[in-house]
């Protein structure tokens, strides 16, 4: 969400917000583009009609701005018409930013929630939401000439259950080394821009600055998104720690996604069979809608990360990124849903 907000400000031409940053000197022309931003994170799509109403709300607001053609009635044709009008009225191609593109599917994933359509046919809500999204996202192909930039963020990369049929597959940058530090804070950035709060935290806990840096590293660092193994701190947790001046488990306390809980409830996998092992990318990059194989969802949700890359074998070692995630995952999820043998969870937490 922070990335989406940053890009929105950039494409709005808000040069003032980037003063003093590297991009301030790199970008010469700060143009303002028409921006269409959708955030699916605010809704709960467990009832029929909610997804359609959400999309309808966005389309209606944009039609109030750019106008409406009554001949276009489907969400796809209406969106293309909006993009066309925005281009004609502003002279610039549109920017589309979609946050949590997959949440309407994840909310009903593996729930078997159904409803009856107008013809009395029983419809699985998961399939229904997927088809609605597919019809909406497929408009990008027909509107390509009106688009400057499109970004979709989400938890999963759906392959076998693609919602992108009908338009050119978007480029997945999740493991592209050019963007591996895009959504986090590197060690160099931490030391360059957060020296003062680090010193303050060290003083509060009566640690040396070196000891506090090590504590922050163990607690919030450890994510890797490419072969170069650049250490990435969880920005949500580290920023909350500096703001509250306290070392706590911030990210995990925001709540465990219900879709992950459901997945683990139905899975026969044990957590110690998933963490600390090497995998080829195909086993954890693509989500395959299989409750018997929870690894992709656990990895893509941020509970496991790359810890080592074996170039000769082309395999990746997956494990917990840091103590915050390790303790939270094992105590909350493993104890209640994976039901490991006596004392195993507590011993793992102590080892963390």
Image (cartoon, rainbow, N blue to C red):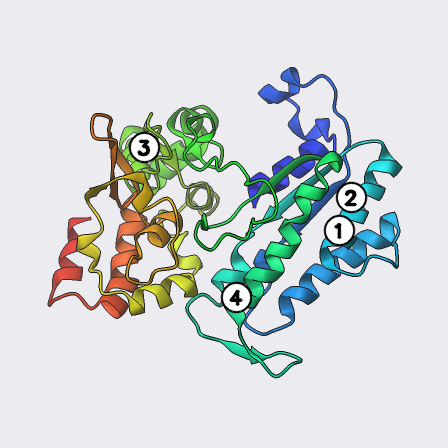
Could you tell me which residue is drawn at 42 percent across and 29 percent down? 190
Residue 239 visible at all: yes
Which residue is label 4 attached to? 127
Near mark 2 (Cα within 10 A), the count class, few <14, some 14-19 or many ≥20, is many
Mark-to-mark CA distance, 2 and 4: 27 Å
User: For the residue labelled by badge 2, is the local secondary structure a helix, a strand or a loop?
Assistant: helix
Residue 160 location (% of width, % of height): 43, 53
Label 4's element?
helix
Callout in the foreground (1, 3): 1
Q: Which residue is mark 2?
A: 83
The residue singled out by tag 1 in the image is 79
Residue depicted at 35% across the width and 64% down the height: 263
- Residue that label 3 marks: 213
Give above or below for 286 relative to 10: below
The vertical placement of 161 against 314, above or below, is below
Estimate the x, y position of residue 93 in percent, counting from the top left.
76, 34
Please tell me how crowded label 4 is: few (under 14), some (14-19), or many (20+) other residues with Cα within 10 Å: some
- Sequence-first tag of 2 and 4: 2
Separation of disc 1 and disc 4 at Cα?
22 Å
Which numbered mark, 2 or 3, is in the foreground of this view? 2
Q: 312 or 214, which is in the foreground? A: 312
Please tell me which residue is depicted at 74% across the width and 34% down the height of the picture.
Answer: 145
């Amino acid at each position: 969400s922070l990335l989406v907000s940053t890009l929105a400000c950039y494409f709005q031409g808000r040069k003032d917000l980037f003063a003093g940053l590297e991009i301030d000197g790199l970008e010469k022309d700060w143009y303002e583009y028409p921006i269409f931003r959708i955030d699916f994170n605010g809704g709960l799509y467990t009832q029929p009609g909610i997804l359609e109403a959400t999309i309808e709300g966005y389309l209606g607001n944009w039609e109030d701005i750019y106008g409406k053609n009554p001949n276009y009635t489907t969400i796809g044709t209406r969106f293309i018409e909006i993009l066309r009008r925005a281009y004609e009225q502003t002279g610039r191609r549109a920017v589309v930013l979609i946050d949590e593109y997959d949440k309407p599917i994840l909310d009903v994933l593996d729930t078997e929630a159904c409803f009856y359509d107008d013809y009395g046919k029983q419809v699985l809500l998961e399939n229904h939401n997927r088809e609605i999204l597919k019809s909406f996202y497929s408009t990008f192909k027909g509107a390509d000439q009106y688009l400057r930039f499109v970004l979709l963020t989400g938890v999963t990369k759906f392959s076998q259950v693609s919602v992108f049929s009908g338009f050119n597959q978007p480029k997945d940058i999740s493991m592209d080394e050019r963007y591996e530090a895009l959504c986090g804070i590197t060690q160099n950035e931490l030391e360059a821009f957060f020296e003062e709060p680090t010193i303050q935290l060290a003083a509060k806990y009566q640690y040396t600055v070196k000891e506090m840096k090590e504590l922050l590293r163990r607690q919030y660092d450890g994510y890797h998104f490419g072969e170069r193994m650049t250490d990435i701190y969880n920005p949500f947790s580290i920023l909350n720690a500096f703001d509250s001046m306290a070392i706590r488990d911030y990210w995990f306390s925001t709540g465990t996604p219900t879709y992950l809980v459901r997945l683990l409830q139905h899975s026969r996998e044990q957590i110690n069979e998933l963490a600390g092992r090497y995998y080829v990318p195909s086993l954890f990059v693509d989500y395959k809608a299989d409750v018997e194989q929870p690894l992709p969802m656990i990895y893509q949700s941020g509970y496991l990360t790359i810890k080592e890359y074996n170039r000769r074998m082309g395999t990746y070692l997956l494990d917990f990124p840091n103590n915050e995630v390790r303790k939270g995952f094992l105590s909350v999820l493993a104890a209640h849903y994976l039901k490991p043998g006596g004392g195993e969870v507590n011993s793992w937490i102590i080892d963390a």
